[in-house]
Amino acid sequence: MQIAPSGYRRRVQQRNCPWLRCKRSQSDEERCTHIQRVWHANWQVYGTVKVWKQMHREGLPIARCTVQRLMRKLGLKGARRGKKVRTTRPDAARPCPLDLVNRQFTAQRPDQLWVADFTYVSTWQGQMFVAFVIDVYARRIVGWR
């Protein structure tokens, strides 16, 4: 790859002398320090919106998308509410069920082939599991519990 010597020297100078950089990168450096300060001052749980609002409260005008871009660049993430839901806990000791239809989920007439499925629904009491029996031909739920 060929690079003009003048372009190479300019890039090296910009790296060594911050005042030669473009205005956006200069302001980004200053804003990054403010974003890190706000994020650390709030126990590293603030996300983009809360950091943005806090900076406005402190009199530092900045766009929300700029805060988002710089937080992503710095690797800062806000805490997520709730706990991670783990719905499947595989047991290596148990055998896998047989595939009785050989992955052929088609039927020529109603009630020829039924399949089962289940899912979970979040409720105030916790996770509720719902099981369905589905007619493959009609693609309708035959029963549920």
Image (cartoon, rainbow, N blue to C red):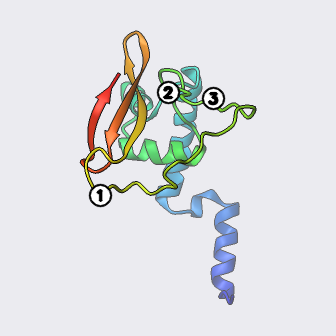
Q: Earlier in the sequence, mark 3 or mark 2?
A: 2
Please tell me whether residue 143 is drawn above or below residue 101 in the rendered image: above
* Residue at image point 68% right, 63% down: 15
Give neighbour class at mark 1: few <14, some 14-19, many 20+ (Cα, 10 Å).
few
- Element on which disc 3 rests: loop
Considering depth in this image, is 73 or 84 the residue closer to the camera? 84
Kind of element beneath mark 1: loop
Between marks 2 and 1 in the image, the one whose residue lies nearer the viewer: 1
Is 65 on the left-hand or right-hand side of 3? left
Residue that label 2 marks: 80
Q: Amino acid at mark 2?
A: Arg
Of labels 2 and 1, earlier in sequence is 2
- Return the residue at label 3: 89
Nearer to us of marks 3 and 2 is 3
SS under mark 2: loop
Q: Are marks 3 and 2 in contact (CB under 8 Å)?
A: no
State which tag comes first along the sequence, 1 or 3: 3
CA–CA distance in space, label 1 to label 3: 36 Å
- Which label sits on residue 108? 1
